[in-house]
Amino acid sequence: MHDQRHDHDYDSDYYARIRANLTWWQRFGLMRNPSQGVVATVEPREGERILDLGCGDGRISSRLAQAGAAVDAWDISEDGIALARSSYPIPSLGFYVRDMLSLDVAETYDACLCQAVLEHLSREQVTAVLAHIKRALKPGGRVIVGIPLHDTRPERRWVRERLLGTIGDHTHLVEWSANRMLQEIRKVGLNLTSIKLTTFGGVLLPGWVRHLDFLEKMIGVWLTVRAAKPQAQLQTPLGGCPLRTIGSFDRNAIARERKGRPV
């Protein structure tokens, strides 16, 4: 399996650009604190063991640990892990320079987070990582995947760089649609439990957007998926759990989202 990623792609300059982009969006009120929504979706619980794959500079990992979980945070970038270790010295939080493709443990974690990670991999690598995650989860364990849709399109990069003044991410390898990512998750035997579509600024979108490919491509859409490993005694068909799509027509979900509560 050919790996196109390089550690130098994720150096200190890369993380400085990412933080600058977030600052720009937040300054003009176009994005809430993105870490808050991610942590609410993970729902960390006291005493749980959580794996954060592709943890970057450790911002989200630290919030998971502060909620009472024991967190193992992996990233391929030595610069990113060094920044994370210096920024968040929390006893229950460990940062490790490791490649997610090397994940090889069984029934160890209660939850796994892949936030803004899988778009950096090839399709074959995504399938492999999702299979590794399923094996690493305890029965009933949950995985949360957050990924930008159609983010490699030239027009999307042009809008970001020329109109918004932010820097596009050249390390994204594959153009994902919502339905293609959902197929990948089902393929490895994980049960989908909820889907949330938002703009990059955090505005909730109706669930039917994922059925309109041209609309996904036209607007910046972020997909957040939560799935679960089947319980050992309750083997269900692929995607057998009830699927909840969070969109702008779910008023209760919107109210909880605004209050920072899980949706």
Image (tube, rainbow, N blue to C red):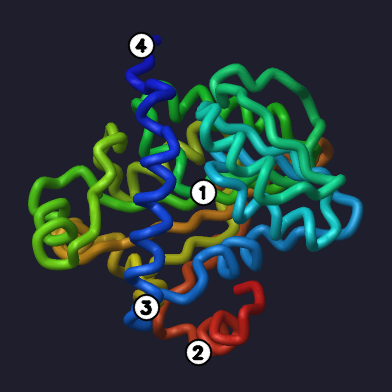
Q: Which residue corresponds to mark 2?
A: 251
Location of the C terminus by quadrant is bottom right
Would you say residue 140 is visible in this rendering?
no
What is the x, y in percent for residue 251? 50, 89
Q: Which of marks 2 and 1 is nearer the N terminus?
A: 1
Residue 82 or residue 219, whichever sits in front: 82
Evaluate if marks 1 and 3 touch, with contact meaning CB atoms under 8 Å apart. Answer: no
User: Nearer the observer, disc 1 or disc 3?
Assistant: 3
As drawn, 140 above or below 128 = below
- Element under label 1? strand
Q: Which of marks 2 and 3 is in front?
A: 3
Q: How far apart are marks 2 and 3 (CA)?
A: 27 Å
Whether residue 161 can be seen here: yes
**Secondary element type, mark 3:** helix
Q: What residue type is labelled 2?
A: Arg
- Residue at image location 37% in from the left, 22% down from the top: 5
Taking 82 as reference, is 153 left or right?
left
Task: Specify few, some or many for label 1: CA neighbours under 10 Å numbering under 14, 14-19, or 20 or more.
Answer: many
**Cβ–Cβ below 8 Å for labels 2 and 3?**
no
Q: Front-most of 196 and 113?
A: 113
Residue at horizontal 39 percent and vertical 52 percent from the top: 18
Q: Identify the residue position indicated by label 4 in the image.
A: 2
Separation of marks 4 and 2 at Cα, in angstroms: 45 Å
Q: What amino acid is at disc 3?
A: Arg
Left/right placement of residue 13 relative to residue 54 reads left
Amino acid on which disc 4 is placed: His
Q: Taking 34 as reference, is 163 left or right?
A: left
**Image depth: mark 3 or mark 4 in front:** 3
